Image (cartoon, helix red, strand yellow):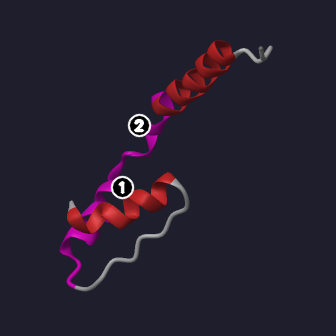
Amino acid sequence: MSEFDFIGSAKRVLNTEVQALMHIERYFDEHFEAVCQAILNHQGKVIVMGIGKSGHIGKKSPQL
């Protein structure tokens, strides 16, 4: 049997994610709004790049 603390590790990861989410709101300002409007109003193609989960989301974004 492994001595690794799976539950403790999962709780630490979740705590880290919670802390990140609590601080992300500061980035939602007029610049974020301007970028969203620019993407919506753009007539050409928008290139989305990412690795891992963000890459999977980027592949699905044309379907949104």
Residue at left 29%, top 56%? 33
Residue at left 47%, top 62%? 55
Question: In x, y percent, where is residue 7?
Answer: 62, 14
Question: In x, y percent, where is residue 19?
Answer: 54, 26
Residue situated in front as seen by the camera: 29 or 56: 56
Residue type at mark 1 is Phe
Residue at left 66%, top 13%? 8
Residue at left 55%, top 61%? 51
- Residue 63 figure quarter: bottom left
Quarter containing the N terminus:
top right
The secondary element bearing badge 1 is classed as: helix
- Residue 11 figure quarter: top right
Residue situated in front as seen by the camera: 39 or 15: 15
- Graded by Cα atoms within 10 Å as few (under 14), some (14 to 19) or many (20 or more), the crowding at tag 1 reads few
> Can residue 61 be found in the magenta stretch?
no
- In the rendered image, which residue does mark 2 sit on? 25
**Where 40 sits versus 11, above or below?**
below
Residue type at mark 2 is Glu
**Where 25 sits versus 1, above or below?**
below
- Residue 35 figure quarter: bottom left
- In the rendered image, which residue does mark 1 sit on? 32
Q: Are marks 2 and 1 in contact (CB under 8 Å)?
A: no
How many callouts does the rendering have? 2
Query: What is the C-alpha distance between the residues marked 2 and 1?
Result: 11 Å
**Where 45 sits versus 2, above or below?**
below
What is the magenta range?
Answer: 22-43
> Can residue 36 be found in the magenta stretch?
yes
Left or right of residue 3, residue 37 in this image: left
**Where 23 sits versus 40, above or below?**
above
